[in-house]
Image (cartoon, coloured by chain):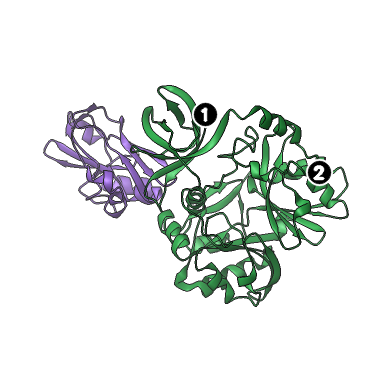
Amino acid sequence: MYPAELKYTEEHEWVRVEGNIARVGITDFAQKELGDVVFVELPAVGDSIKATDSLGVVESVKAVSDIYSPISGQIVKVNEKLEDSPELINQDPYGEGWIAEIEVEDPKELEGLLSADGYRALVEG
Amino acid sequence: MAARKTPLYLRHEGLGAKFVEFGGWLMPVSYQGILEEHRAVRTKAGIFDLCHMGEITVRGERALEVLQEATTNDASTLPEGKAQYSLFCRPDGGIIDDIIVYRRGEDFLLVVNAANREKDWEWLQEVNKGRAELVDASDGMGLIAVQGPKAEGICRTLTDVDLGALGYFTHTEGEFAGLSCLLSRTGYTGEDGFEIYMPAEHVERVWDALLEAGGEDLEPAGLGARDTLRLEAGYTLYGNDIDETTNPLEAGLGWVVAWDKGDFIGKQALAAAKEKGVSRRLAGFKMLERGIPRHGYPIQRGGEEVGVVTSGTMSPSLGEAIGMAYVRADLAGAGTELEVLIRNKPSKAQIVKRPFIKPSVKR
């Protein structure tokens, strides 16, 4: 499961770009590796972050995992549904399980991300 | 050193298990998901591969004498057919391991934690000084646990042994799935259930027979669910909640220390600690604010550090984040509010009584 329209990071985040807004989540591979997600710590709307900064935390029953921001910019929206329903990340990682939306500061950063094929190669080796 | 595999490794692989290294063993952490496996054990039954656990037999005329010195509980009061929770302690009272002792005639079978097997073995030999016959039977012995409200019903179909008459912490030998086994009504989940010991070469057959007999009522469960289940039941985990730097009194395991049985290793230090009063206690707590406590997170009260988390998880049964922590003794009472430092953010928590859920073991 590697939707072709998305960009990916080596840390297993995905990015969906619409205009100057980038929606970010974790990949299907990442949610499977984590197992049942039971807690999500979201970033604060309005925060400015740099690429590779922590964008939040996803916790499964056993593991704590940082989510790293694929790009720099300002957080404009977060998926508050995850606070009560963290399992959305397992159920629909590329849809209802999105984590945050970032206003893209430098579109050039997007060019450094992996394509679906590139990410597939990384995961499947 | 490469992690060891239990006789059931291929079974786990066939079931699509995720593996984790634990105590030097490659063990299934989950199959269908920890939450699902946890629920299965609480509502029907789960089957666990515990072949990684160590088994040591203590035999001979002086077996009891050695055991009385080496363990904190009173093995002399243990009748044939009963099992007992006990501890090995260092001379300074630190816990070397927590164990189950089975009496089999004049002999004893000790079940020890996988990660402590070599350490326990060396230490026991030191204490023994050649008096009893010690055998590390771990490699030849397999162990499967079946836990949950439907465990007895499933196990009944595979044995003529009267399981209904087998009380909590008792055991018997008998045929199970056509093979000789030691059947014990014990567990680490807070549910009714059995631990079944057998020669390692029979483990796969017993596992298969159980899965077939259990059908939809029985699900394989991994170490992940074992951990959430034991934490809800308030049981300590060696290496997390207890270790050589903690003593039984701090850990709430004073009930396992038999003060009146005569001398045993660690008694003097523990008696002195009891006299003086412990400075910290292992307490259960639940989070009042969002966040999951994890092993090693500091506990504060008004900015002052007063303890440390030893175990924590999102409780699948309660839907709340729970944990255990060593906290300053005067703050260990139920109702006390503290803060757990989660990623440098103090989050409110409250001390609650252990266990978090009432165990439904057979009494």
Label 1 secondary element? helix
The letter of the green chain is B
Residue at image coords 51%, 38%: B283
Q: Colour of chain A?
A: purple
Residue B199 picture location, percent across and down: 70, 64
Question: Are circles 1 and 2 on residues that touch, CB within 8 Å?
Answer: no
Would you name the residue on which mark 2 appears?
B125
Q: Nearer the viewer, residue A59 or B243?
A: B243
Q: Is residue B233 left or right of residue B165?
A: left
**Closer to the camera in the image, B99 or B209:** B99
The vertical placement of B204 against B114, above or below, is below
Location of the N terminus of chain B (image quadrant): top right
Q: Amino acid at mark 2?
A: Gln
Is residue A125 visible from the viewing direction of this image?
A: no
Q: Residue B170 lies in what quarter of the image?
A: bottom right
Q: Residue at x 57, y 77 (%)?
A: B157
Q: Earlier in the sequence, mark 1 or mark 2?
A: 2
Picture coordinates of residue B15, whole percent (x, y): 48, 63
Amino acid type for the residue under numbered disc 1 = Asp
Residue B330: which numbered mark, if any?
Answer: 1
